[in-house]
Image (spheres, grey):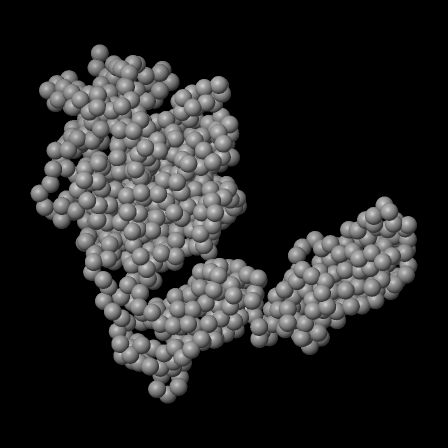
Amino acid sequence: MALKKLIKQQCFVVFIAWIFSPAMAMSATFASFSQPISGDLDNLSLSGWACEVGNSSPLSISLYAGNTRSNAALIATAIADKTSGDGVEARCLSGGSHRFTLEIPQQAVFDNSGAQVFVETTVNNQTRTLNSSATQFLPEHPDTALIGYLDAVADVNGRQFAIGWACQTSVAEPIDVALSTVDSNGNKVILTEYFKTEVIGESAINALCSTPSGKHRFRLPIPENAHIDFANNPLFVEAVAAFGEQSRTVAKYRAVNVPSEPAREVDAARKPNIVVFFTDDQGYADVGVHDVLADVHTPNIDALAESGALFKQGYITAPQCSPSRAAMITGIHQSEFRMDENQHIPMTLEVETLANRLKEQDYATGLFGKWHLEITNSSQEWGAENYPDVEPFVSSVVPEEERLQYFPHERGFDDVLAGYTGSYVRTMDLSGQTIPVETYRDSKFRVDLVSDMSLSFIDKHWNSPFYMHVAHYAPHVPLESPQKYLDLIPEDMPVRRRYALAMMAAVDDGIGRVVAKLEQYNLLENTIILFISDNGAPLGDDMTDAPISARETWNGSRNDPFTGEKGMLTEGAVRVPYIMHWPKRIQSNMLIDEPVSALDAAYTAVKAAGLGEEELAELGGMDLLPLIDGEEHTFMERPLFWRFFFQRAVRLGDWKYMQAGVRREYLFDMTAVEPESVNYINDFPEIAEDLRQRYWNWAQQQPRPEPLVEIPIPFSRRVDRYLPLPPP
């Protein structure tokens, strides 16, 4: 019997550390050691010793369930007599060694299945709880370990679901549930494989589940042909209990049968969902579908590209985190609101986010992961304007309520978990419940935590259009990974590379889980999924493979086959992985080779969501659908502009003009195999001058003045390392 086996393997470890109050007439110190719990449900007991210095009188021992000393919570009592031998006195080092055995009735296990227990004793009329080195629980009773309800069948986005919940004592992790029925001969037929439930905390379920934890919502898809083969036959939901492999049938509120009619068609007018995956410092080489390096493991990302559109010349608007994120969050080039570099945060409160605009279209909005648009110690410019007496500026001087104004929950995102690793600001918990904004600490691997929150958001908003921005803080340093992802990556490579690949495999796993969740709710067909990196990888010039704990620049990612790295305006810094997936509108295996901006992806998504022409005119992108559909377009005639850290660049058609500081000017042919290996600045002066003038005409329209000064010497050496030396 699985339960018996578990019980025999369990042990209650009771370590008693007890110091009497100084007011007591007799000072005594307690310690203990214990034996494993023994027996089965018919003969279950807990034995151990209590050691009290200087006391040889018998001790009264009581075992309680829960967190009260009420008679209802009392499980068992026993008298602990002074004893000797078996090494007891040697362990107790005292004259007061007391052996006890507590018999645990089966009814007590039934009544308190899985409950926490504690042991108490009384000496000199004072009650003391015997502290334990670990929280202890009664075993699960097979007849009470799982309860729940199959409530109804509902049509959801053109698919039928069996809906209900399960309640399982002290089990907070998702459990496996499967849907079944019976055929005409009364034989069980499995309609679905096992699905993981979601852990929830809805008030109605709290009232129905009397357990302190473990409320599990399920929505199980009913196969499309079930109404033909099993119409009006009863439906059952089976759950695998946490204590073993035995399955339990979830109870029913009412008779729930297989529908006799097919699901209603999906509402053709329903607006598309929008899901943005925005990774951090992931280079062009590090998606498998680009077929650059053989060590990359991203099957789910590759599948999005293979069943959608892959943009081979997809560009981000800046080679650094905050400005590129600001553009993706607003759909507006960051220079238009003075956000050219990380040091220019926080993002001004005056600019509208896409979340603000989409809420007006009745979208649910959520952001999970990295934000990096708030007030930080890097906000020296903002600090000088708002806190001029604080030099150097530190963000901790800003009152919390003022700092929170710059976080995503105040910028149009309702459901939020924003942060880096370990510490977050959140307005939604893992069960999907809305909570007051709070600072939250969680030691779970940051990539998996963000993926888990994304799934909860979909579970929460599956029946209305939603916009979800998923910003995995990966493969940005600090590098870290659970073993399960490291096991996917061979060991015979630089350690930083291996950890980066493991982190990207974790991102890929999370994307696969989100896609599966969308499929579960029949939402994938009409969901726009965007996958883009915020900038190219930092290489530290030579990709030094230091231990992952070291402060080394290289994050393990790669920009091959392109030149340069994060912080530059070369292709390796601004050309990034860029995928769009929307089965309702985009055919499979679309390969797009025209230059596009991340602003275009944002524009396309919100236009599909119903934004009007007036609002669209405020954005900086273009609609990608004509390009995807092969219709006439002007993408090759549209210039793309960059400026960052005394560098400037413009891409128009097949040419790219770039200037670093003053003396270093370049003109590159972007049709070349290695597009930034040859400088044509003197060969095509008319093209260079045209692009130069276009750039400065654009720059003069931006609110932040741009000084024309030489770049610092350390950075100029990096530029000369990657690019051909400028003409004399």
> How many discs appear?
0
Q: Quadrant of residue 178?
A: bottom left
Residue 134 position (above or below residue 104):
above
In this rendering, position of residue 301 left or right of residue 59: left
| x and y percentages locating residue 45 in the rendered image | 73, 69
Residue at 35% from the left image edge and 72% from the top image edge: 153
Image quarter (top left, top right, bottom left or bottom right) of the C terminus: top left
User: Which residue is outermost to the bottom?
Assistant: 185
Q: Quadrant of residue 323?
A: top left
Residue 450 position (above or below residue 244):
above
Residue at 63% from the left image edge and 64% from the top image edge: 115
User: Which residue is outermost to the left?
Assistant: 632
Note whether residue 565 is visible.
no
| x and y percentages locating residue 697 in the rendered image | 17, 22
In this rendering, position of residue 131 left or right of residue 469: right
Note whether residue 663 is visible.
yes
Q: Nearer the viewer, residue 685 or 394?
A: 394
| x and y percentages locating residue 333 in the rendered image | 26, 32
Residue at 29% from the left image edge and 22% from the top image edge: 704
Q: Quadrant of residue 354?
A: top left
In this rendering, position of residue 215 left or right of residue 629: right
| x and y percentages locating residue 650 in the rendered image | 20, 27
Q: Nearer the viewer, residue 252 or 476?
A: 252
Q: Nearer the viewer, residue 156 or 481?
A: 156
Residue at 40% from the left image edge and 35% from the top image edge: 406
User: Which residue is outermost to the top?
Assistant: 728
